[in-house]
Image (tube, rainbow, N blue to C red):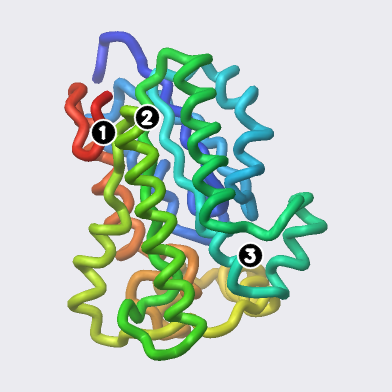
Amino acid sequence: MHSGPIETVACVGSSTTASKGTFRWIAELESRPQNSRFRFVNLGVGGDLSFNIIRRLRRVIGTQPDRVIIMIGTNDILASVFPNFRRIIRVWKGLPAEPTVQRFTDNLALITRRLRQDTPARIALSSLAPVGEDPHSSDPVQSRLNDLCAALSGVIRDVSLREGTYYIPLYEAFQDQLVHSQTAKPFTRFSFPSFYRDYLFREMILRRSFDEISRINGWEFHIDGIHLNTRGGRILTHAVQEFLDSPGATPGGTQ
């Protein structure tokens, strides 16, 4: 049992962080004895885009964090590629303008600078897990998703370098695993009914596990092409654990 000071770790992001209908990576980290010195605060909100995080920074700062993990960008990608998702998000989240790589860059830089200014926390920016599992797809939708995931992950790394934060190389870790994928399944359409089917019916009513739903849907690392199953979640958990274990040196940053 850890007897020293407890560090507060604020985890900021969308549904992957909120752990609704996806692998519960924060709970997994909390269960590990080496993390007993941390108090995790889950500040994930499903559906959030990068601009939503700016609006929630006061709450993040209010936790008086010692560390902050920022994991955002997947919904910016989905809103860029799928008009039906963008229409819903425009109303649900108050989306002011269509997401672009430049807007994402500006938002992430603002988030990072505000946290550096208003907290003493060590900040970690995580790159993105893929949407879909076919990194070399000829399908135009999956190809666009791949391009945007690579572009936004590159932005995250660049902002991390420029602002001197820790960089969590989730994108790179996933790419290493996708090379060995047996299915290379593309994500070609966004459907809200399919998500409700998986989360409300298969999980909540039929009590199927995430991994059972994943197998039904034909994914290796995802439940539905977006949210992570146990195999995908372990890639994320390992990458975050390296940040928690780091004494101060930063691969990709200078903090």
Gap in Å between the C-alphas at discs 1 and 3? 29 Å
Residue density around tag 2, few if under 14, some if 14–19, many if 20 or more, within 10 Å: some
Q: Secondary structure at mark 1?
A: loop
Graded by Cα atoms within 10 Å as few (under 14), some (14 to 19) or many (20 or more), the crowding at tag 1 reads: many
Residue 253 has which mark? 1
Residue in the foreground of this view, choosing between 228 and 168:
168
The image's mark for residue 163 is 2
Compare residues 224 and 117 and report the one nearer the observer: 117
Q: Secondary structure at mark 3?
A: helix
Q: Is residue 175 left or right of residue 8?
A: left
- Which of the two marks, 3 or 2, is nearer to us in this view? 2
Q: Is residue 217 above or below residue 117?
A: below
Labels 2 and 1: the sequence-earlier one: 2
Residue that appears at 26% across and 11% down: 3
**Nearer-N-terminus badge (3/2):** 3
* Side of 195 relative to 175 (left or right): right
Kindly check if marks 2 and 1 are in contact, taking CB atoms under 8 A apart as contact: yes
Q: Residue at x 47, y 36 (%)?
A: 11
Do the CB atoms of the residues marked 1 and 3 lie less than 8 Å apart?
no
Mark 3 highlights which residue?
79
Q: Position of residue 79 (x, y in %)?
A: 63, 65
Q: Residue at x 35, y 53 (%)?
A: 154
> Is 42 drawn above or below residue 59 in the view shown?
below
Give the residue type at disc 3: Ala
Q: How many marks?
A: 3
Which three-letter amino acid code belongs to the residue tagged 1?
Gly
Report the quarter where the C terminus lies.
Answer: top left
- Toward the bottom, the furthest residue is 138
Query: Which is more N-terminal, label 3 or label 1?
Result: 3
Disc 2 element:
helix
- Is the residue 211 above or below the residue 122 in the image? below
